Amino acid sequence: PKAGSQTTQTLFDKAIQNYIKKYKYSNTVQDDLYREMQKVYSEDGNDKEVNISKVMDTWTLQMNFPIVSVDQYDDKSVILSQSRFLISGSDASDDKPSPFGYQWYVPIEYRINNSSAVMDFKWLKPNSRLQLPFDVEKDEYIQLNLGSNGYYVVDYSYNIFMKLYNAIVKKTLNLTTSEKQGLLYDTFLLVSLGNKPMDKALDLLKAILADNDAYIPLKEISRQLSTIARHIREVRVEESNQEVYLSKKWKDKWKADIKKVYEEHGKKYFNATKSDPLPEKSDGTNFQKRALIKFAVALGCSYGVADCEKEAITMFKNYKSDKENNPLNEDFKGTILNVVMSQDLSDELTENWNLMWDRYQESSQQNEKETIYYALGLVQDEKILLDFAKKCLDKTLVRSSDSLYILGRSLTQTYLGCNVSWAFMKDNWDTISEGFDGALFAVDAYVSGVLSSFTQQSMLTEIEEFFSTRMDSLKSGKAAYLGAIQSIKANIVWLEKHENTIKDYVETSGN
């Protein structure tokens, strides 16, 4: 809608009400709904040149979604253009042609500087450009896709992106929860395409992390940090005349930031002696608060924050000494078990692993079983992991419906686990492919889980050679295998692009 008109939601609700009234007890087609939407839209004084049916067709009758590029046009304006998003960047050789040429009617809401009001609503139409006012000298920033409501990615040119970034750092731009998540998602998606430099994306992530008190952005931050960690977990670097994994230094780099999150949002709720109770579940407004608390604790422990790990280990010891009177806190059970199973190998660790395996066998609760088996896969011992994999194929110990999910998801959480899982797959492929024939989703999860995260050309070659004579045996898992091969190739390209940047960022950027 035009500036000052009724909200989009109000107009939509009115159109739906009119549509239901008009066509009750009747059969309809999509154009019937579009006509009612058009009527309400036009009555509100909006652009009569915009045909709702044509708008909707560009979104429902072709694949993908657009990237909206924002570039400086002159000293007083920016220019918007659109292109099709492709994960490969530009290769569309296998795609079907579109009657719309992969162009869309894109609804543009934007804000200049920290105005509480939407500056205006405009359409970026197919095969056209849109000019917006923006004084490069006077205006601090321009922000598109307010509320992250639009189904498109915003690609700000470098100078405009830096204006937005500087406003976030100076706290003159107050992003909503969804806008923080959306800006991070868009930025790292553009990094994967080569449209944005990795170091600036990480600077943005750090700025949002420093001033965030909501669950959804924190989860997006964690997702991006974890994605990078998975990509670099095979890379070794020198530290104090010793060779260490770059992923370890990556976690150490972010530990101080994560510690602040833990101390601010999770620490008082995670204490082996006396913890504050979490907000009540019965209050619907507390869902995000509870999620933030639990996630802050999980992050703190996963990044090795000493206080967090100490409390988790103490809680587990209390549980071991008296299970009946010291049950594990259900809100933090997964975090506690993950910490315990990630400790250095020892007789006590083996004892703890066996204890939780026995509990897995005893439990009749699927949620608890999943929590336990994810933790069991974190152990850093090849022998235990291999034994765990063998147990998964024993139908007297693990339900058939769980076996491949454990093998493909639990055991593959770590670099060691991935290698053990691949070796186990090769040694037992005939048994697995024959025993689980027809279990479509489980086979997909297994094949994808074991293969997709490798990042080296040597592993790609080894995997392709192994399956070159076994393609028929993949059966329902063939699509997952081909997808995994594409993922490995993408991982290799990612590492070639970003490995040195990550190394430099870890070494030279301050905490």
Image: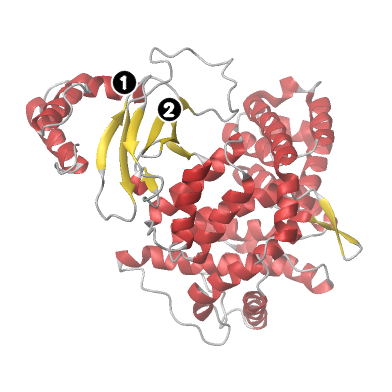
**Where is mark 2, residue-wise?**
82
Is residue 449 found left or right of 363 in the rendered image? right
Image quarter hosting the C terminus: bottom right
Left or right, 338 with reference to 183: right
Tag 2: amino acid:
Gln
Question: Which residue is identified by label 1?
Answer: 57
Which residue occupies the foreground of this view, 305 or 134? Answer: 134
**Label 1 residue SS:** helix
Residue 143: x %, y % from top left: 38, 46
User: Is residue 151 in view from this perspective?
Assistant: yes
In space, the residues marked 1 and 2 are separated at their CA atoms by: 17 Å
Q: Is residue 220 above or below residue 193?
A: below
Q: Quadrant of residue 428?
A: top right
Q: Residue at x 54, y 76 (%)?
A: 263
Q: Residue at x 46, y 50 (%)?
A: 163
Query: Percent position (x, y) of residue 125?
Result: 32, 24
Q: Is residue 142 above or below residue 27?
A: below
Determine the residue located farthest toward the bottom in the rendered image.
Answer: 273
Q: Position of residue 450 (x, y in %)?
A: 71, 41
Q: Is residue 64 left or right of residue 193?
A: left
Contact (Cβ within 8 Å) of mark 1 with mark 2: no
Q: Position of residue 343 (x, y in %)?
A: 75, 68
Q: Helix or strand or loop: what does disc 2 sit on? A: strand
| N-terminal-most mark, 1 or 2 | 1
409 to the left or right of 426: left
Query: Splitting the image into 4 quarters, where does residue 150 fall?
Result: top left
Q: Nearer the viewer, residue 367 or 490?
A: 490
Amino acid type, mark 1: Asp
